[in-house]
Amino acid sequence: MGLGSAIAGAAVDAAEKQAEMNQRLKGRTPEQQKIIKYFYRSKGCLSEGLSDQEYESMVMQKAKSMDFKQKALSKIGLDESQVNEVDPIHLEDYLFDDKAFALLGKDAVWRSSAYQVSWLFFSATQVYVYQYTFNMDEDGKKERTEEYFYKDITNFQTTTETTEKVVPGKVSCTGNVSYVRTNVDSNRFALVVPGDKFYCAMQQDDYSEKAIQGMKAKLREKKS
């Protein structure tokens, strides 16, 4: 998930952010409105709003409600038996792009309003990638599929990306919120081809580390 941050710059006008929040709430479902308020920390410490754990549960529930592996195979148009050169690999995490909200939880974990799931499949000659990104604060989603020949892939790599966000700082018990600019670092996987990179949000853990090492080994094998 999102890594640590460094505060950068002066506080942001709170009244402006509250007006922005009110505008974003218009036309949203009750659940989406709760989520938007969560990212603006619009509730004082004596009021009830979404907790970090409640929001996390909502995201995981939505992610698990869709069989992304099967959706990926359907989009690619192949049977799993045709892409078994390497065990299918899935990568997922919050996405900290320019449009997404971001918030540092009380548990010191960064979360965003966008979540991305990617599946990679490997045939004898190609790598197939399926990616699904959904937003918790709106109905927006994005599906993408790509396929690459091993001979065209130059590398599999991990990168750390930094995105500047305006996030809530101190919250008073009366509900007054101060906002600050901060840099949010996040990990991404990249499939590299000449002149382009395909990025996937990812959690850096033992699974992803072993998966990437396995992909690199297979790429070396195919290019030898």
Image (cartoon, rainbow, N blue to C red):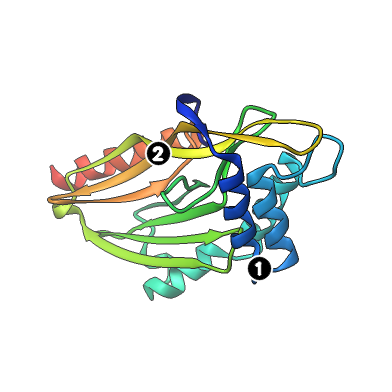
Residue at the far right in the pictured view: 46
The three-letter amino acid code for the residue at tag 2 is Thr
Is residue 205 at all visible to an observer of this figure? no
Above or below, 13 against 133 in this view is above
- Image coordinates for residue 211, horizontal then vertical, percent: 41, 40
- Give the residue displayed 31% in from the left and 60% down from the top: 123
- Give the residue displayed 76% in from the left and 39% down from the top: 175
* Secondary structure type for disc 1: loop
- Give the residue displayed 35% in from the left and 66% down from the top: 145
- Image coordinates for residue 149, horizontal then vertical, percent: 20, 59
Towards the viewer: 93 or 81: 93
Q: Is 183 left or right of 159, judged from the image as shown?
A: right
- Real-space Cα separation, disc 2 to disc 1, in angstroms: 26 Å
Q: Where residue 163 is drawn, which disc sits there? A: 2
- Give the residue displayed 44% in from the left and 69% down from the top: 73
Q: Where residue 28 is drawn, which disc sits there? A: 1
Is residue 16 at all visible to an observer of this figure? yes
Q: Is 95 left or right of 25, judged from the image as shown?
A: left
